[in-house]
């Protein structure tokens, strides 16, 4: 099933199938001259158009893959640290087993494997560009906004470029105050503000958590394969109580809707409603889907470009 891609679901919502790609599977290390040649070769509009079409075809054939591709794009980018200028999507390191082994990336080996045939069919596009483009195409294919995307990421050929584990958000930090503080710590590190934190959290419109993987279980909205503002609508308007969705067993602390007990929220989701600065944006996006789409598009594009250089419009 599809999985939640956004802020607090990083470490929380994934399924591991035990197959991690090795460094050898991603190709042999290239010499310096060849690396420079790759960096100098600009991908064409036709090549990007074909890759977009291939990605859309993959998602339309199985819409449950769409949310996971958003999560892959998110997690490939969400390691960025503005102070050290390390991490981000620029080198495609999430394909290495060392990064896939990070707790927040459990299950993303499947998405990497789904895209391997597309990489073979679109050899001029780097893995880093393909993973980020996959998220952009998934959002649009599932009914969301067009997200500005630029090409030019150059793949690393060494797992030594993988950033340390622990840079992705956690879902439960012990209290509403700690959850809000944790979100700010993670997202401020990447250069985001409170409004952008809430906008990016809206990607929880997509996907679900799995009990046998994370200990959390359930979907955030009634439409987990449609990108819309329902995450904010149900977060604001539904009554929530601690507990697992009906018929399931949860290992971790989470919330369910009181009336139907079919929807879930993570502690960091509920924390958005307990913080005045966050809640004003929850209010806005619950009442204005177009405003959410505009702000999400800007924030997600920024996320995908953090830590990159020499990108260009195709």
Image (cartoon, rainbow, N blue to C red):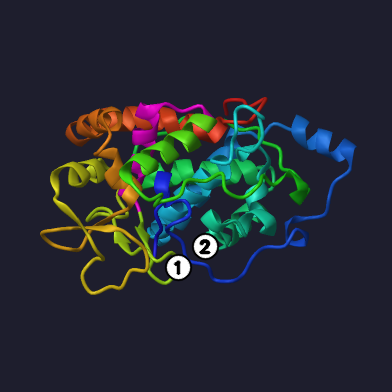
Q: Which residues are magenta?
A: 190-206
Let me know if residue 201 is in the magenta part. Answer: yes
- The foreground one among 234 and 241 is 241
Say if the magenta span includes residue 23.
Answer: no
Tell me, yes or no, whether the two marked residues, 2 and 1, touch with CB atoms within 8 Å. yes
Judge from the rendering whether residue 41 lies leftward or rightward of residue 175; answer left or right.
right
Percent x, y for residue 99?
Answer: 64, 53
Q: Residues within 10 Å of mark 2 (few under 14, many from 20)?
A: many
Q: Name the element at disc 2.
A: loop
Query: Could you say which disc has been placed on residue 107 in the image?
Result: 2
What residue is rendered at 41% in x and 37% in y? 181
Using the numbered discs, state the Cα–Cα distance from disc 2 to disc 1 in whole angstroms. 9 Å
Residue pointed to by mark 1: 213
Rendered-image quadrant of the N terminus: bottom left
The residue lying at 41 percent from left, 49 percent from top is 173
Q: Nearer the viewer, residue 156 or 10?
A: 10
Q: Quadrant of the C terminus?
A: top right
Count of numbered tags? 2
Query: Is the residue 106 above or below the residue 124 in the image?
Result: below
Left or right: 117 as drawn, with respect to 177: right
Position of residue 181 in the picture relative to residue 32 (left or right): left
Say whether residue 143 is visible: no
Q: Nearer the viewer, mark 2 or mark 1?
A: 1
Q: Position of residue 185 (x, y in %)?
A: 48, 35
In front here: 244 or 225? 244
| Main SS of residues in magenta | helix
Q: Is residue 25 left or right of residue 149?
A: right
Residue positioned 82% across, 33% down in the render: 36
The quadrant in which residue 59 appears is bottom left
Q: Quadrant of residue 291?
A: top left
> How far across and how far down the image is residue 176, in percent?
31, 43
């Amino acid at each position: 099933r599809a999985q939640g891609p956004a802020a607090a679901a990083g470490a929380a919502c994934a399924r591991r199938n035990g197959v991690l790609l090795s460094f050898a599977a991603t190709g042999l290390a290239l010499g310096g001259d060849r690396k420079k040649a790759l960096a100098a070769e600009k991908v064409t509009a036709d090549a990007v158009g074909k890759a977009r079409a291939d990605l859309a075809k993959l998602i339309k054939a199985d819409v449950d893959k769409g949310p996971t591709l958003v999560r892959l794009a998110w997690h490939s980018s969400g390691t960025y640290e503005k102070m050290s200028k390390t991490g981000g999507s620029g080198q495609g390191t999430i394909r290495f087993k060392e990064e896939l082994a990070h707790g927040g990336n459990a299950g993303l080996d499947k998405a990497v494997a789904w895209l391997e045939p597309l990489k073979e069919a679109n050899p001029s596009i780097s893995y880093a560009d393909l993973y980020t483009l996959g998220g952009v195409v998934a959002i649009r294919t599932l009914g969301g906004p067009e997200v500005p995307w630029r090409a030019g990421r150059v793949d690393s050929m060494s797992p030594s470029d993988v950033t340390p584990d622990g840079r992705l958000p956690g879902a439960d930090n012990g209290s509403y105050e700690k959850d809000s503080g944790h979100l700010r710590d993670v997202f401020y590190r990447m250069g985001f503000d409170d409004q952008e934190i809430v906008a990016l959290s809206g990607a929880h419109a997509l996907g679900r958590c799995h009990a046998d993987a994370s200990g959390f279980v359930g979907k955030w909205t009634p439409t987990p394969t449609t990108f819309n503002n329902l995450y904010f609508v149900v977060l604001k308007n539904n009554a929530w109580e601690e507990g697992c969705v009906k018929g399931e067993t949860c290992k971790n602390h989470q919330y369910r809707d009181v009336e139907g007990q079919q929807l879930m929220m993570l502690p960091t989701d509920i924390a958005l409603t307990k913080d005045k600065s966050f809640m004003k944006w929850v209010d806005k996006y619950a009442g204005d889907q177009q405003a959410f789409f505009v702000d999400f598009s800007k924030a997600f594009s920024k996320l995908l470009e953090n830590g990159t250089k020499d990108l260009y419009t195709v």
